[in-house]
């Protein structure tokens, strides 16, 4: 089944690699020759405000569920169980040197993370154009990655799919892609392109550990940024801010890149008649994607409609069941009525009559207790109410 998240068990990890700049690990389980599980450390409740461990767990679970149903079914984030975390950390500490960042993120005295897992998705690339240093702070710009981004972003489908992702981000209070208030391109690495998938962009990261109550789907209610989902003018303004920020961030990075002594760049692409070489002025990159703002806005609107339909269906699905009528809740008949009924001609003597006042009713049949009732987190219901979706 696509999107299923493998379980980590004793002896199941047969390979592990990890990133140096953030707590992300790629695991090979059960003899797989390629990674089939991604493990990621999110900030735990003591690393941010307005969030308990339960709040974080609910927010991660439902944020992933919403993105999966609006964007791509491969989005499937699960919180790891304590035994899984212990097995993962043990394998990671054996795989990396004690001085490496990969080791320090999982070793004794390391950061307190909420560890989550998700299926490994092949064909992924991201929009990050910085190369992090293996040691020490800082990063350098990689111009060739910016050139690759320009080609990828020059696509209506990319902006449509990205709009659906951002619609869920706005509902989730996730500013770890674009800030939900002003559209600043906050995290380049969280815009993830998918080659050969059902969508061109996939929203794998759905939880913002720094989002305070906006990111709290368990208890956090409505906030003004949600209006972007239902207000056309606000949505158009927000879309324009986002596409402008993408161009502005790439332009700023190119101008600051070491060794960039020219005012233009050349990009090679595949045309219908063979390779095409284009020259682009760096000064024009800042507004290069403005024409995609209406497409991006339409993607946000489509994502909002999908989100609304999904949540309204969940409200109906999780509605409390109609309670069956209690047969013993009727008013007891009078003694005279009981006697009159008992002497009706033709009534067999073995008919079980209603109990007389003061008598105990016959034992009830052995009915198993009802299954636990599924519920929608209150924070999600409050956001739906704010948007007039319920």
Image (cartoon, rainbow, N blue to C red):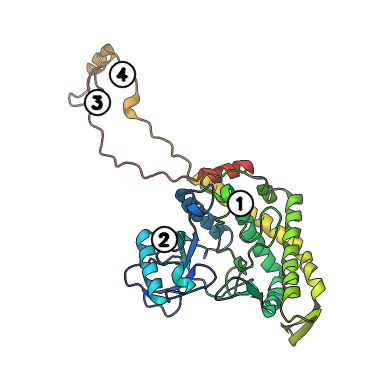
Q: Position of residue 100 (x, y in %)?
A: 47, 74
Q: Quadrant of the N terminus?
A: bottom left
Q: Is residue 139 left or right of residue 86?
A: right
Q: Secondary structure at mark 2?
A: loop
Q: Is residue 262 visible?
A: yes
Residue occupied by mark 1: 171
Q: CA distance from mark 3 to mark 1?
A: 53 Å
Mark in the foreground, 4 or 2: 2
Residue on which the image places disc 2: 80
Q: Position of residue 123 (x, y in %)?
A: 56, 75
Q: SS class of the residue under badge 4?
A: loop
Number of residues whose C-alpha sits closer than 10 Å to that of mark 2, classed few (under 14), some (14–19) or many (20 or more): some
Q: Nearer the viewer, residue 381 or 224?
A: 224
Q: CA distance from mark 4 to mark 2?
A: 55 Å
Q: Distance of mark 1 from mark 4, alpha carbons?
A: 54 Å
Residue placed under numbered mark 3 in the picture = 361
Q: Nearer the viewer, mark 2 or mark 3?
A: 2
Secondary structure, mark 1, is: helix
> Which SS class for mark 3?
loop
Q: Earlier in the sequence, mark 1 or mark 4?
A: 1
3D distance between C-alphas at marks 2 and 1: 24 Å
Q: Residue 14 vs residue 305: left or right?
A: left
State the residue position of label 4.
332
Quarter of the image for the C terminus: give it. top right
Image coordinates for residue 57, horizontal then vertical, percent: 46, 53
> Image quarter for residue 163?
bottom right
């Amino acid at each position: 089944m696509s999107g299923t998240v493998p379980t980590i068990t004793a002896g199941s990890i047969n390979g592990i690699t990890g990133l140096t700049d953030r707590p992300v690990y790629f695991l090979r389980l059960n003899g797989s020759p390629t990674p089939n599980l991604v493990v990621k450390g999110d900030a735990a409740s003591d690393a941010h405000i307005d969030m308990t461990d339960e709040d974080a767990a609910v927010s991660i679970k439902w944020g992933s569920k919403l993105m999966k149903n609006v964007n791509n079914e491969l989005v499937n984030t699960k919180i790891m169980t304590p035994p899984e975390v212990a097995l993962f950390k043990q394998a990671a500490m054996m795989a990396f040197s004690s001085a490496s960042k990969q080791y320090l993120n999982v070793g004794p005295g390391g950061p307190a993370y909420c560890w989550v897992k998700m299926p490994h998705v092949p064909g992924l690339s991201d929009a990050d154009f910085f190369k992090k240093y293996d040691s020490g702070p800082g990063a350098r710009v990689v111009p060739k990655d910016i050139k690759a981004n320009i080609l990828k972003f020059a696509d209506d489908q990319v902006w449509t799919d990205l709009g659906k992702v951002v619609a869920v981000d706005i509902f989730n209070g996730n500013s770890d892609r674009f800030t939900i208030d002003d559209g600043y391109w906050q995290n380049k690495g969280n815009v993830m392109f998918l080659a050969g998938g059902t969508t061109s962009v996939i929203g794998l990261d759905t939880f913002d550990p720094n989002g305070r109550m906006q990111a709290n789907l368990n208890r956090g209610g409505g906030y003004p940024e949600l209006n972007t989902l239902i207000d056309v003018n606000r949505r158009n303004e927000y879309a324009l801010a986002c596409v402008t920020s993408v161009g502005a961030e790439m332009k700023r990075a190119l101008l600051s890149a070491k060794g960039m002594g020219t005012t233009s760049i050349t990009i090679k692409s595949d045309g219908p008649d063979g390779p095409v070489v284009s020259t682009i002025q760096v000064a024009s990159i800042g507004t290069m994607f403005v024409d995609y703002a209406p497409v991006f806005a339409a993607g946000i609107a489509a994502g909002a409609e999908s989100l609304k339909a999904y949540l309204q269906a969940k409200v109906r699905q999780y509605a409390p069941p109609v309670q069956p009528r209690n047969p013993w809740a009727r008013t007891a008949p009078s003694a005279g009525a009981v006697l009159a009924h008992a002497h009706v001609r033709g009534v067999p003597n073995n008919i079980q009559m209603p109990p007389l006042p003061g008598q105990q009713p016959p034992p009830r049949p052995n009915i198993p207790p009802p299954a636990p009732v599924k519920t929608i987190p209150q924070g999600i219901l409050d956001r739906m109410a704010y948007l007039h979706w319920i």
